[in-house]
Image (cartoon, coloured by chain):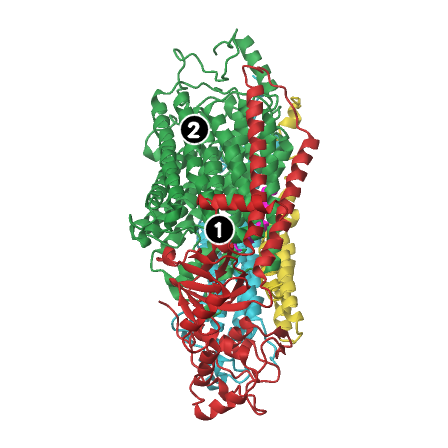
């Protein structure tokens, strides 16, 4: 039952061979500047879009732009693009739980108006 | 003995043994990855922390849309927009700071950290101006909350706003409560962040982060960017509910 | 019930006599008890199973009998067994429970409506005929009774264990529950949601009477004014009739026959007018503006008690013609209820 | 090393020769001296001991309130204390037991002590944050005591709005702050565990070689990290609403009291899994050790922990079935509730079948574990009553609920906690507890517990509402039984406090591995060194591999011989 592990395999203190590890990556200032420009641009767009009457699309567009900006910040400023699967999964997990909170609670509020059954 | 010896062979992995290395980590790499993962987990709790507020916002915005739209129009888009730009800029300098630490440039690191702090303080300053205006207009929820401006906008010199019925006007208080709760919670995170920035700047000035030990800068960067992200959502949700004419 | 009725009655009566089981005094109670005994059986079987596994294995494989353990990895087949069988049983419980839930929380159409107002720390019951009771409730047996309940302050919960019904009484919204009492007698009535200092004093008695007795009781204890009559007076004194008078030029919609109809609101949505809608429309009028009308109605939040609201709702429910509304309008002051900001309600 | 016993005995306890044995001179207790060396320590074992002392303190305070509640309920009349006082009693009992005892009980004490050792690490990933978490716990505890001393709180531990926000004049904000702070203590513990499990495992310690104790803590930690902040923000809103009279939860101001319920239970339902999952981890270790057999269906037990953590987030509205949630969502939440019951059933059966073909001995931890299995089965199955929509109408808010969650929390968690404390006591202190006295305590606890809480099921079905200061006289007999049981239970809990204290000085020297268990923690000296391992082990065997242990011991004997 006891597995024999060779020394090389066994001695992997930083867990280099496991999927939780990612090589360290340095993002350059040029990349940061591009991200910075994008963020400013989309801030302008979101303000502009708010002044145009798009009916139901207004909040959707505002949220879509905000989410896009958030994703850009997460991927580049926060280096998630270059991180291990573990960190990516962690971020996804946070937003998933947040969605669970919102969706499951909304399912109560929305269906209340459907009547008493 | 059944256990073989795990030898510390740091050179083998090409890592420098920095003085900040803690005894219970095998390698500096392990310590750094643990730190950044821990920071991410902390940010998860922050997501859920703001999540409760965002849900309350979502619910009441749907229930009392007219009140939310009118109350939101009381906020200043130029100030809010400027603050968004300021915060993004602050985040940009923070990101540059992380880069400066990675490439071990002490002076650039110190300058970017100072700029980060400056823009953060500027954000808080503008926030203060906005809060002060709300105070003067009696838009702080509580005993002194005043809805007259929403019931009778014309009397307050507001011509482009439809009057709200008294019961709906009362619900602007919920908007302002959520506004203060969400931006206040955000500002609190900013204040904590600025405090930490002072400390980090001091340490950076002493050259602590110019020899490959970047974890504190990197992790603080994560925190600072997270605070940015919260604002990226707060701005459209609070300031830009309905800026086009209602009719 | 497929269990022998005689046996069932014996079991229930015996348990009840030894104060181990509540009386079955409503039509829903036997259904609830059936599910209860099923779940109880499930628990006993589960417990006996786990218990005998532990005891059996402990005896057979104790160290003095079985000094060397045989290592076993596990077995997918067995894992599947004790995943699927409990799951199936739990799903049975789910379906059974759901059916019962909808039975208890969906009143039959022909039920008699009694209003319940909960406040710290008493229950007020208001019968349609104008009988008011505090901490007691008189009901006739043999006909479905619907309780429309609301709280004036905090969460309460209205529970009659012998009828196996309970529902939270919450502030700001009507909740309903119904029962059909089967046996004459008096039964406990509890507030089961913690509501402050005198929580355990918020109790009362439900008296189930024969329909004839109930009639007699109703006649003796009426205040002389039915809820609708009270409502009519309130309607005039609050000045509602100034706008809601049914005239062609009226500023408010015509209320005659509005109960039970479908209204189209200014925002285009269609709503069914029921008690909850009427109450909401009085308190938050601007969210319930009927299509074709201006949002000019002031809010009455903080100005009418829940009892007053019940009177108004009952009145509007019974309103079939505007004749009397227009009669009273001539004699009452119509500017009595000016829009004001409701003050904070804090004790 | 003493020689192997010739005759098969009824015990697996293998102690060193008491005449010559000593506690290792160098260990985490003797490493440094003085109070400051404890208060400023970064050593997870010392922090665990600090936690153990403080949660024991709060347990007995919470227990004292339970005692006073039961004493008041001895008679139907409200005669011992006033209603307000009674309400403060059960509120304090709830707040202390939930937030200051049950949530941190196993993870912060036993978990803190063992997590790094079981993974083959020198310490948790963030020792300073670990210490910070203990201080936060203390601040939370002190604030709770402050609320108590200043005049008490009478909201119930559930803080139901608008009662807590607009209708009470007690120290609600202080209590809310206490829970807020204690919540962050729990977040930091969870965070530390997750990072440690991901990042600090010894070479060769793959996910499926981890003991089930670690798996269950991993699942509980996820719940702590993701659930607790929602409670924190909810309490902030309650405090703000109370302080400024704003109406987010107040219907007269356009708020919604059910919003509070949703947010509160979004944490507080997963919280019950935070409480029970670590206990389940203890049971896995104990059952395996005393039946000398690997846990039946290791993978199933491991994944059922994760499944509980996952499903735990989807069922919170089952606390609100009668509160006016929509019927449709009640249906959804009831269905999901039935699903979350399955992983618990899986665990119970796997433990039961671990005994099959084992070589079972009956030391105290095992007795507690058997108690856990029986009581948790009842607690779990009565949970199905409450998850079943129609049945819930009659049973919720009665003593049935009280009995149900005490079966899970006290019958389950507290039994598991005591099993764990006894099981790892020799490792933590280097000394054995007195066996026969502790067996007596285990049996006393079991009997007392059943006497206390079984009558409450009957009371519940009779309709006796919970949190009642006075009750109709026909319920007295069952209440008297319950109070009598509580007395026995109280003795059952006092006993371990006494003899464990005694054993610190007079207990037999335990040696490294008195239970002959396989876990990494048993392969090092007891009490362990500050750095746990002189050299980081390389793990080349699976958890619960008794054959590996046997081989190892034979090698040692031959080496010594």
User: Is residue B169 found inside the magenta-colored segment of the image?
Assistant: no
Q: Residues within 10 Å of mark 1 (few under 14, many from 20)?
A: many
- What is the span of residues highlighted in magenta in the rendered image? D307-320
Residue at image location 35% in from the left, 36% down from the top: D487
Check disc 1 and report the residue beneath it.
Answer: C23
Chain A's colour is: yellow
In front of the other: D477 or D334:
D477
Lateral position of residue D371 relative to residue D440, left or right? right
Chain D's colour is: green
Is disc 2 in the same subunit as disc 1?
no
The secondary element bearing badge 1 is classed as loop
Residue at image location 32% in from the left, 31% down from the top: D34
Image location (x, y in percent) of residue C129:
47, 74
Image location (x, y in percent) of residue D223:
54, 45
Supply the letter of whichever chain is cyan.
Answer: B
Check disc 2 and report the residue beneath it.
Answer: D442
Residue D477 seen in render: yes
Judged from this view, the residue extending furthest toward the right is: C77
Residue at image location 44% in from the left, 88% down from the top: C335
């Amino acid at each position: 039952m006891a597995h024999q592990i060779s020394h090389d395999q066994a001695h992997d203190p930083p867990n280099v061979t496991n999927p939780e590890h990612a090589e360290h990556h340095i993002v350059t200032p040029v990349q940061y500047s591009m991200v910075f420009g994008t963020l400013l641009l989309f801030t302008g767009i979101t303000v502009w879009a708010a002044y145009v009457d798009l009916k139901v699309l207004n909040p959707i567009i505002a949220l879509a732009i905000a989410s896009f900006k958030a994703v850009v910040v997460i991927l580049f400023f926060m280096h998630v693009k270059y991180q291990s699967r573990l960190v990516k999964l962690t971020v996804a997990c946070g937003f998933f739980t947040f969605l669970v909170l919102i969706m499951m609670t909304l399912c109560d509020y929305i269906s209340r108006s459907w009547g008493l059954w | 003995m059944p256990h073989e010896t795990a030898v510390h062979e740091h050179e083998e992995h090409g890592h420098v043994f920095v003085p900040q290395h803690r005894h219970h980590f095998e390698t500096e790499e392990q310590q750094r990855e643990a730190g950044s993962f821990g920071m991410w987990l902390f940010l998860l709790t922050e997501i859920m922390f703001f999540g409760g507020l965002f849900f309350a916002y979502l619910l009441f915005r749907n229930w009392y849309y007219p009140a939310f739209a009118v109350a939101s129009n009381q906020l200043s888009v130029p100030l809010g927009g400027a603050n968004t730009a300021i915060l993004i800029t602050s985040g940009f300098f923070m990101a540059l700071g992380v880069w400066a630490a990675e490439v071990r440039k002490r002076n650039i690191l110190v300058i970017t950290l100072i700029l980060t702090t400056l823009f953060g303080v500027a954000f808080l300053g503008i926030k203060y101006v906005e809060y002060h205006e709300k105070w003067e207009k009696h838009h702080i929820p509580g005993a002194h909350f005043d809805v007259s401006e929403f019931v009778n906008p014309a009397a307050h010199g507001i011509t482009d706003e439809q009057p709200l019925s008294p019961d709906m006007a009362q619900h602007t208080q919920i908007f302002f409560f959520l506004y203060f709760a969400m931006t206040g919670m955000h500002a609190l995170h900013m204040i904590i962040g600025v405090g930490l920035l002072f400390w980090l700047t001091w340490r950076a000035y002493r050259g602590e982060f110019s020899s490959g030990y970047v974890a504190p800068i990197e992790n603080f960067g994560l925190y600072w960017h997270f605070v940015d992200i919260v604002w990226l959502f707060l701005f459209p949700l609070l300031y830009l509910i309905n800026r086009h004419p209602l009719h | 019930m497929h269990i022998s009725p005689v046996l069932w009655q014996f079991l229930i009566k015996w348990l009840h006599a030894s104060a181990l089981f509540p009386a079955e005094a409503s039509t829903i109670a036997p259904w609830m008890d059936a599910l209860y005994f099923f779940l109880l059986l499930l628990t006993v079987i589960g417990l006996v199973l786990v218990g005998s596994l532990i005891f059996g294995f402990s005896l057979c494989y104790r160290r003095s009998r079985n000094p060397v353990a045989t290592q076993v990895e596990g077995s997918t087949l067995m894992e599947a067994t004790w995943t699927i069988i409990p799951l199936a049983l739990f799903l049975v419980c789910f379906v059974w429970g759901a059916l019962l839930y909808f039975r208890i929380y969906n009143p039959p159409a022909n039920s008699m409506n009694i209003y319940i107002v909960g406040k710290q720390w008493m229950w007020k019951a208001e019968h349609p005929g104008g009988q008011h009771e505090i901490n007691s409730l008189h009901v006739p047996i043999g006909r479905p009774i619907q309780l429309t309940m609301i709280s004036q302050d905090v969460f309460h919960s209205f529970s009659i264990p012998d009828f196996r019904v309970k529902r939270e009484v919450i502030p700001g919204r009507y909740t309903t529950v119904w029962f059909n009492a089967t046996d004459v007698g008096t039964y406990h009535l509890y507030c089961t949601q913690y509501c402050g200092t005198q929580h355990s004093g918020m109790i009362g008695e439900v008296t189930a009477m024969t329909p004839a007795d109930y009639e007699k009781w109703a006649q003796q204890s009426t205040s002389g004014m039915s809820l609708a009559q009270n409502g009519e007076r309130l309607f005039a004194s609050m000045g509602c009739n100034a706008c809601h008078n049914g005239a062609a030029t009226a500023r408010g919609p015509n209320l005659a026959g509005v109960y039970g109809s479908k209204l189209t609101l200014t925002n285009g949505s269609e709503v069914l007018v029921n008690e909850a809608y009427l109450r909401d429309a009085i308190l938050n009028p601007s969210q319930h503006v009927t299509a074709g009308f201006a949002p000019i109605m002031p809010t009455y939040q903080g100005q009418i008690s829940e009892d007053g609201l019940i009177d108004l709702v009952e009145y509007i429910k019974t309103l079939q013609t505007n004749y009397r509304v227009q009669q009273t309008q001539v004699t009452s002051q119509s500017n009595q209820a000016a829009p004001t900001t409701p003050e904070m309600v804090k004790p | 090393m003493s020689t192997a016993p010739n005759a098969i005995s009824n015990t697996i306890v293998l102690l060193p020769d008491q005449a010559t044995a000593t506690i290792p001179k160098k260990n985490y207790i003797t490493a440094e001296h003085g109070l400051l060396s404890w208060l400023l320590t970064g050593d997870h074992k010392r922090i665990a001991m600090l936690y153990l002392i403080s949660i024991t303190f709060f347990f007995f305070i919470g227990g004292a309130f339970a005692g006073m509640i039961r004493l008041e309920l001895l008679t139907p009349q409200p005669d011992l204390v006033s209603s307000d006082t009674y309400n403060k009693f059960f509120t304090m009992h709830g707040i202390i037991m939930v937030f200051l005892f049950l949530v941190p009980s196993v993870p912060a004490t036993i978990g803190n002590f063992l997590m790094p050792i079981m993974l083959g690490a020198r310490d948790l990933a963030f020792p300073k944050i670990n210490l910070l978490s203990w201080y936060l716990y203390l601040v939370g505890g002190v604030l709770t005591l402050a609320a108590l001393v200043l005049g008490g709180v009478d909201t119930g531990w559930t803080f139901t709005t608008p009662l807590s926000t607009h209708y009470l004049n007690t120290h609600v904000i202080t209590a809310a702050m206490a829970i807020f702070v204690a919540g962050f203590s729990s977040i930091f513990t969870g965070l530390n565990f997750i990072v440690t499990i991901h990042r600090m495992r010894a070479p060769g310690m793959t996910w499926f070689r981890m003991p089930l104790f670690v798996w269950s803590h991993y699942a509980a930690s996820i719940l702590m990290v993701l659930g607790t902040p929602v409670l924190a923000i909810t309490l902030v809103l309650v405090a703000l609403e109370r302080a400024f009279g704003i109406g987010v939860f107040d219907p007269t101001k356009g708020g919604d009291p059910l919003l509070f319920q949703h947010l509160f239970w979004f944490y507080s339902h997963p919280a019950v899994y935070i409480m029970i999952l670590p206990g389940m981890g203890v049971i896995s270790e104990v059952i395996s050790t005393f039946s000398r057999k690997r846990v039946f269906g290791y993978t199933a037990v491991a994944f059922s922990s994760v499944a509980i953590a996952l499903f735990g987030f989807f069922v919170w509205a089952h606390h609100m079935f009668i509160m006016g949630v929509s019927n449709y969502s009640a249906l959804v939440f009831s269905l999901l509730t039935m699903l979350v019951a399955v992983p618990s059933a899986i665990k119970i059966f796997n433990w039961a079948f671990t005994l099959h073909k084992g070589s079972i001995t009956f030391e105290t931890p095992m007795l507690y574990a058997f108690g856990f299995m029986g009581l948790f089965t009842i607690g779990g199955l009565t949970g199905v009553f409450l998850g079943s929509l129609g049945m819930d109408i009659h049973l919720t808010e009665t003593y049935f609920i009280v009995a149900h969650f005490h079966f899970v929390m006290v019958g389950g968690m507290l039994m598991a906690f005591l099993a764990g404390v006894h099981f790892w006591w020799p490792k933590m202190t280097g000394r054995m507890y007195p066996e026969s006295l502790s067996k007596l305590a285990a049996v006393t606890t079991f009997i007392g517990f059943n006497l206390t809480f079984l009558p409450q099921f009957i009371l519940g079905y009779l309709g006796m509402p919970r949190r009642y200061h006075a009750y109709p006289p026909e319920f007295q007999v069952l209440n008297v039984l319950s109070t009598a049981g509580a007395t026995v239970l109280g003795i059952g809990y006092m006993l371990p406090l006494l003899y464990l204290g005694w054993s610190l000085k007079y207990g037999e020297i335990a040696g490294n591995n008195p239970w002959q268990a396989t876990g990494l923690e048993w392969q090092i000296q007891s009490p362990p060194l500050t750095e746990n391992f002189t050299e980081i082990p390389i793990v080349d065997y699976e958890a619960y591999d008794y054959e590996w242990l046997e081989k190892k011991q034979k090698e040692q004997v031959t080496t010594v011989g």
